[in-house]
Image: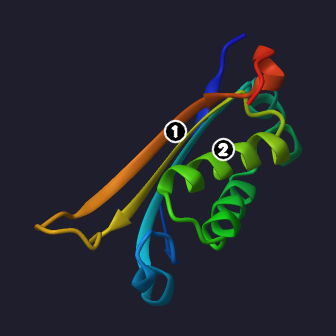
Amino acid sequence: MALQRIDLEAQREYAYHGCLEEEAVIGSEYRIDVSVWADLSASALSDDLADTVDYVALRLIVSEEMAIRAKLLETVCARIIQRIFKDLPAVQRAEVKVCKLNPPIDGDVHAVCVSFFEENPKHTGKAL
């Protein structure tokens, strides 16, 4: 079966992730990119939202998970992917990239990013 991809690019969120106490108080700007793979052939024929992966639902998942503080971006990425697989079972693969813009580190760094790519265990038989 062929898979098609839906991309949610450059979602911006203000959140409070990080290991420093100041980050919990001040917060930072984040950019999140999400790609999901699913069989979209039915929706291409039906032109019906019920037959596809709703990208509004993807955006809401990202917003809700970004609102839950974590020390590590790895934790945030993992939560977003697990939630996508839980809430949107048609998704067979997902990639999530979370970037902290202007991170509080020495030097001129535009962003620090963490990316996770996983396959839905419901489609592969693997445990998360």
Instruction: Give the camera-side residue of 38 and 100.
Output: 100
Residue 116 circle label: 1
Q: Secondary structure at mark 2?
A: helix
Q: Secondary structure at mark 1?
A: strand
Label 2: which residue? 81
* Mark pair 1, 2: CA separation: 8 Å
Q: Quadrant of residue 43?
A: top right
Dot 2 amino acid type: Ile
Q: Are marks 1 and 2 in contact (CB under 8 Å)?
A: yes
- Answer left or right for 70 relative to 102: right
Task: Give coordinates of residue 41: x percent, y percent.
Answer: 75, 24
What residue is rendered at 81% in x and 33% in y? Answer: 90
* Up/down of 118 relative to 11, above or below: above
Image quadrant for the N terminus? top right
Name the residue at the bottom extreme: 25
Image quadrant for the C terminus? top right
* Up/down of 20 relative to 1, above or below: below
Dot 1 amino acid type: Phe
Asked if residue 88 shows in the view, the reply is yes
